[in-house]
Image (spheres, rainbow, N blue to C red):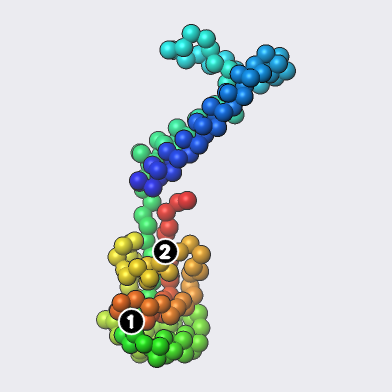
Amino acid sequence: RQRALRRSAALLLFLSSLISVTYALDDYNEEERLAAKAWYLRKLRVPFLEDPLPVSPVTICLVAFILMQLYWSLVGEEVPVYCEASHILLQDKTDVGKRKLIKYKSQIGNSLPNFQEAAKKYSACPSKQNGGSLGRFGEGQMARPFEKVCFDPKTPLNTTLGPVQTTFGWHLIYIHDRQLPPM
């Protein structure tokens, strides 16, 4: 929700500065512009101003869009951010552990059944009973390097990823599903 508010506020600030620059340019050559493009402008009456403002339909649409964004960021439903993944953990934090995982990764390929079998066989995590499945988890629940791979929008789904090193050891990761925040 805070990310959406910040995004809406930044968009509002950018567009308001763009509109103010447009008005500054408009004031420069107001008479010629009004004569040449009278069809393009509408007079907008603002209660606290004496004279109506010349406003283009594009400006009205932009302001309406900003207001809608602000409204949905405040009132709209928040999209849950999650990742559903499985992993294989080797607690050996040396290069030997990393080389083992590289070997396992080549044997597994991108096959989920092969990944689950390897997790049951090689993983040091209790999740190995479930084929390495960690279920769904949100941001901030896993070790930072692990989470960075899981929540990176460039990381492909249904692919064996890694090895990734955390404080627990080396991991191979298989991401089943992911919901990222809207951009």
Q: Earlier in the sequence, mark 2 or mark 1?
A: 2
Report whether residue 117 is seen.
no
Residue 158: % across, % down: 48, 73
Vertical position of residue 171 compared to residue 22: above or below: below
Point 58% across, 17% down: residue:
54
Up-down relation of residue 115 to residue 44 (above or below): below
Residue occupying image coordinates x 67% and y 13%: 31
Q: Which mark is residue 169?
A: 1
Percent position (x, y) of residue 139?
34, 61
Residue 150: image tag:
none
Q: Residues within 10 Å of mark 1 (few under 14, many from 20)?
A: some
Q: Amino acid at mark 2?
A: Phe
Residue 111 at least partly seen = yes
In the image, is 88 to the left or to the right of 112? left
Q: Mark 2 = which residue?
A: 151
Numbered disc total: 2
| Residue in front for this viewpoint, 91 or 17 | 17
Q: CA distance from mark 2 to mark 1?
A: 19 Å
Residue 28 lies, in percent from the top left, at 63, 19
Question: Mark 2 or 1, which is nearer the eye?
Answer: 1
Q: Secondary structure at mark 2?
A: loop
Q: In which quarter of the view is residue 165 placed?
A: bottom left
Residue at the front extreme of this rendering:
28
| Amino acid at pointer 1 | Gly
For the point 34% across and 85% down, which residue is it? 93
Q: Quadrant of residue 88?
A: bottom left
Say few, some or many: other residues with alpha carbon within 10 Å of mark 2 (under 14 / 14 to 19 / 20 or more). some
Regarding mark 1 in the picture, which secondary structure is present there?
strand
